[in-house]
Amino acid sequence: MTNDEKIKLAEKLLLYCKKFNVPLEFLFEILEDQKVTPMIRGKAMEYNAFLLLDKILPKATWSVQKLNLNAQTGTYDEDISITHRRTGVILKVESKSTVRGSVSDGKRSRNLKVPHFLVKSHRSRSNIKLAGSSNDRYSVDSFDVLITNTSNAIFEGNTVGEYLEVVHDAELKQLLFEFYSVSSDEGLISACEKDWRYCIPKDIAVGGFIPRTPYVKLADDTNWKPLSAIEERLLQVVEEKRKSNQTTRRK
């Protein structure tokens, strides 16, 4: 970031505080409050996913857009859209955080006996109201791609300190260190922030709905693949949509 960019950022920050009556001297105390941080991290995840998709996908084939749409009744607030330029097919992408503290070695799990984590794939309370439903699960056709990364799963839940705490269990932490080839908490956090996975909703749906908190294997999951390998699967989804005439063009 250049000095001019830093100056412009500072000016925008001052204007923001003035606009929303935020006391500048307590700005970071507000941002680091544990009730506020999860919301900021969730929104930041959307933009990080957008930036990564925009970098990964060839611009000659795809157009990636970050959407900031206000959800209307019966809909949800769409995160990202990917347009296949040749066909005009538009794919809806949803980014979802992993469940905080959900990483597990699987030894005491009833459902999956290998290392895994959970993804928070259900609607928020406000989104349930907008959808006009009491069901907090998304239908399989709510979006075309689901994206996550493992970072939130490695933080302990229900902590009250100033900072997020990496899992305390020594054996589990060592397992994670070995999996990510790191030797410190800082290295683990950095590695998990780069560990992006994607799935196609129909591949994990049960009875026409996406599970509230689907299980994801830490290694070699059948349905959740590295985001770096997403293009081939996207082309398959585009072809399926084209053949079934279920394109999602915006008017």
Image: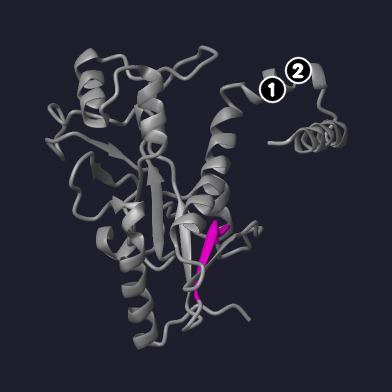
Would residue 209 be visible to someone looking at this image? no
Counting labels gives: 2
> Residue 86: x, y in percent?
48, 83
- Residue 82 lies in magenta, yes or no? yes
Graded by Cα atoms within 10 Å as few (under 14), some (14 to 19) or many (20 or more), the crowding at tag 2 reads: few
Image check: 194 left or right of 47? left
Image check: 163 left or right of 72? left
Q: Which residue is mark 2?
A: 26
> Residue visible at 53% across and 40% down?
42
- Residue 48 lies in magenta, yes or no? no
> Residue visible at 40% across and 46% down?
148
> Residue visible at 76% across and 17% down?
26
Query: What span is in magenta?
Result: 76-84
- Measure how far apart labels 1 and 2 are at the Cα level: 6 Å
Where disc 1 sits, the SS reads: helix
Q: Amino acid at mark 2?
A: Phe
Q: Which residue is mark 1?
A: 30
Q: How is the image coloured?
A: one colour
Q: Amino acid at mark 1?
A: Ile
Which mark, residue 204?
none
Q: Does 184 sit above or below residue 136?
A: above
> Residue 140: x, y in percent?
36, 65
In the picture, the quarter occupied by the N terminus is top right
Q: Give the residue furthest to the front.
A: 2
In the picture, the quarter occupied by the C terminus is bottom right
* Residues tagged 1 and 2 counted as in contact (Cβ below 8 A): yes
